[in-house]
Image (cartoon, grey):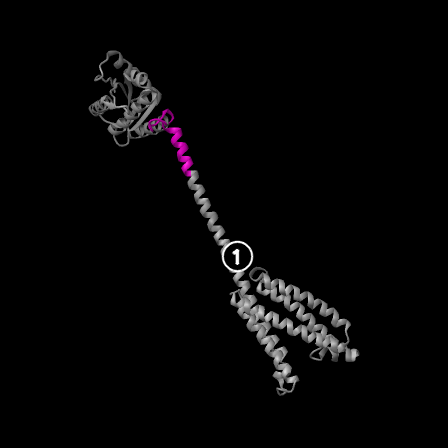
Amino acid sequence: MTFNGLGTLIFWSFLGDNTARLVAIGFTFASTMGTLFAQSFLNTAHYCPRWHQAITLFRGYCWLALAAVILLPTQPALRLMDITGFSASLLILTCGIYCSWRRVPSARIFVLAWAIFLLGAVVFALRNLSILPANFITLHGIQIGSAIEMLLLSFALAARFNKLKWQKERAQAETVAMLKKQEAVLEAKVAARTQALEQLANHDMLTGLLNRHGLTRYAAEALERSQRHHTSLALIMCDLDRFKPINDQYGHEAGDFVLQQVAKRLEHVARSGDYCARLGGDEFIVLLEDIHDTQILDEICTRVEHAIRSPIKLSCGTIVSVGASIGVSISREGNDTLASLLREADSKMYVVKSRQTPRYYDYGSA
């Protein structure tokens, strides 16, 4: 306002010749704050640490110059203002060019805006030296250059804000995507862990067949289907013969190997949809649905017996074989629970074992 004369005309006309000191104070203070704006706009602390330090030191000089402008006589104060303003403009422009060369964000538009402002100042100075004619442009060169500078820097700041907003939104989207991905991974791990726990709860660890708990679970479902569809369900119980001597002579590892081979063979001869289980020790169960006549059951029992009796080659090269005592029970009215089927099959299995007639299967009355 002092530079344009409006302040002198309206507010501080009483200052008279001392009004020029306000011009010196204003432009020196502008040089001081201009260096701070340049550091902030160009982010010199991050991209150009040495330039940041140099501008900081120069701003210290600007504060001293501002104090001197207040205390010195008017003419020395104006000359100090010129030196300070020229030095600040040159330093900021050089820093901007360097940052533009280093591809610092928005540095090019900063150099353009600052160059336009300095061009306006040069035009104004040349008019004062009578090199350029006096007209609206030369008279108001600094104001025009400053207005264009602020407009360009405003666009640059708006673009920067939009970029920061986009980066923030992108970071949030990436965070959400990462959280969703981690949630999916966690759900997959939970599902896998649940499946593993269910496997442990329902299956025998040695053979992979159903254990007692798993057999109870699937038998309940099979019995419910059998009652609903009015079909019969059969349970085959196999107790291995001559297994204990193998376990005693060749060790528990050999015994475990024999049990695993028997389990694989039972799964192989069982029909699709049948359930094979190991109750513990050397007792195995085959649970069959949709049994319409005893002939089919007899064929299955024969296949089970032959599969179990087939020779087994141990890891040491020795060939061994085991036998099987088999008892069978069929569901019917009054015998439609797993416990009752197991009791009946167990009883008949021991009858077979005592008779030592492995080809005899007692189905009871259907």
| Image quadrant occupied by the C terminus | top left
Whether residue 236 is in magenta: the answer is no
* Front residue of this view, candidates 153 and 296: 153
Q: Quadrant of residue 38?
A: bottom right
Residue type highlighted by circle 1: Lys
Residue 186 placed where, x, y %?
45, 42
Residue 180 placed where, x, y %?
46, 48
Residue visible at 46% across and 50% down in the picture: 177
Q: Quadrant of residue 229?
A: top left
* Front residue of this view, candidates 200 and 8: 8
| Image quadrant occupied by the N terminus | bottom right
User: What span is in magenta?
Assistant: 191-213
Q: Main secondary structure of the magenta part?
A: helix
* Front residue of this view, candidates 282 and 143: 143
Q: Dot 1: within a 10 Å radius of its alpha carbon, few (fewer than 14), some, or many (20 or more) residues?
A: few
Q: Is residue 109 above or below residue 176?
A: below
Q: Of helix, strand and loop, which one carries label 1?
A: helix
Residue 245 visible within the image: yes
Residue visible at 66% across and 64% down in the picture: 57
Q: Is residue 81 above or below residue 137?
A: above
- On the picture, is 265 further left or further right than 191? left
Return the residue found at the far right. Answer: 14
- For mark 1, what is the residue? 168
* Front residue of this view, candidates 74 and 236: 74
Whether residue 198 is in magenta: the answer is yes
